[in-house]
Amino acid sequence: CDLEIISRPLDFLGLNYYVRELVRADRRVPLIGLQRLPMPGRTNYRGDTLYPEGIEEILCRPLQEYGSNLPIFCTEVGNAFNDYVDPTGRVRDGGRIAYLDAAFRAIHRVIDRGVDVRGIFVWTLLDDFEWDAGFSARYGITFVDYATQRRIPKDSAFWLRDVAARNGLVQMS
């Protein structure tokens, strides 16, 4: 019964993308048999590599490797940053804006190459509890004061609002 269900054609492919990691096989590592390798480039405060352009590589793989052009939804795109409310009451998360801008541009290049990307969902609306970091990793475009539950839109929320209103990114010069 399960095989029959999972053998049905797919309607779309959902993709989550945050970071890129390099690994190599290592049978000495319990359970996963992989060893993480150091990554060059910029990192966030948690040490995760900031490589938003990697989404371009991932989105092209189904078409390049399998000849599949199923509709794709980027169901989670984002990265954690060390967000805080400044003395003026704003949350200035320029790193997130730069990350999302680069990821959106990479996705646009993929669409230009013929990949059927139908939607992008930023991870996430609100800061939340992350399984590997608790409340210390802030992925949201809205800051949550966990003590009071007050919500403060971050600069990235206003950036995303403006991208949606324009129906596009600002042209790079």
Image (cartoon, helix red, strand yellow):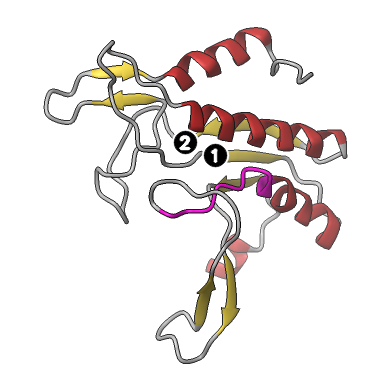
Q: Which residues are magenta?
A: 47-55
The x, y position of residue 169, in whole percent, is 69, 18
Please identify the quadrant where the C terminus is shown.
top right
As drawn, 10 above or below 154: below
The x, y position of residue 33, in whole percent, is 50, 84
Residue of label 2: 123
As drawn, 170 above or below 65: above
Occupied quadrant, residue 146: top left
Lateral position of residue 112 relative to residue 76, left or right? right
Lateral position of residue 171 relative to residue 40, left or right? right
Who's the residue at 73% across and 40% down the image? Answer: 71
Occupied quadrant, residue 61: bottom right
Residue of label 1: 77
Please identify the quadrant where the N terminus is shown.
bottom right
Cβ–Cβ under 8 Å for marks 1 and 2: yes
**Residue 81 lies in the magenta stretch:** no
**CA separation, marks 1 and 2?**
5 Å
For the stretch drawn in magenta, what is the main secondary structure? loop
As drawn, 27 above or below 142: below
Q: What crowding class fits label 1: few (fewer than 14 Cα within 10 Å), some (14-19), or many (20 or more)?
A: many
Asked if one can make out residue 77 in the rendered structure from this viewpoint, the answer is yes
Q: What crowding class fits label 2: few (fewer than 14 Cα within 10 Å), some (14-19), or many (20 or more)?
A: many
Q: Nearer the viewer, residue 77 or 156?
A: 156
**Amino acid at circle 1:** Val
The x, y position of residue 100, in whole percent, is 58, 32
Q: Which mark is residue 67?
A: none
Who's the residue at 53% across and 87% down the image? Answer: 26
**Amino acid at circle 2:** Trp
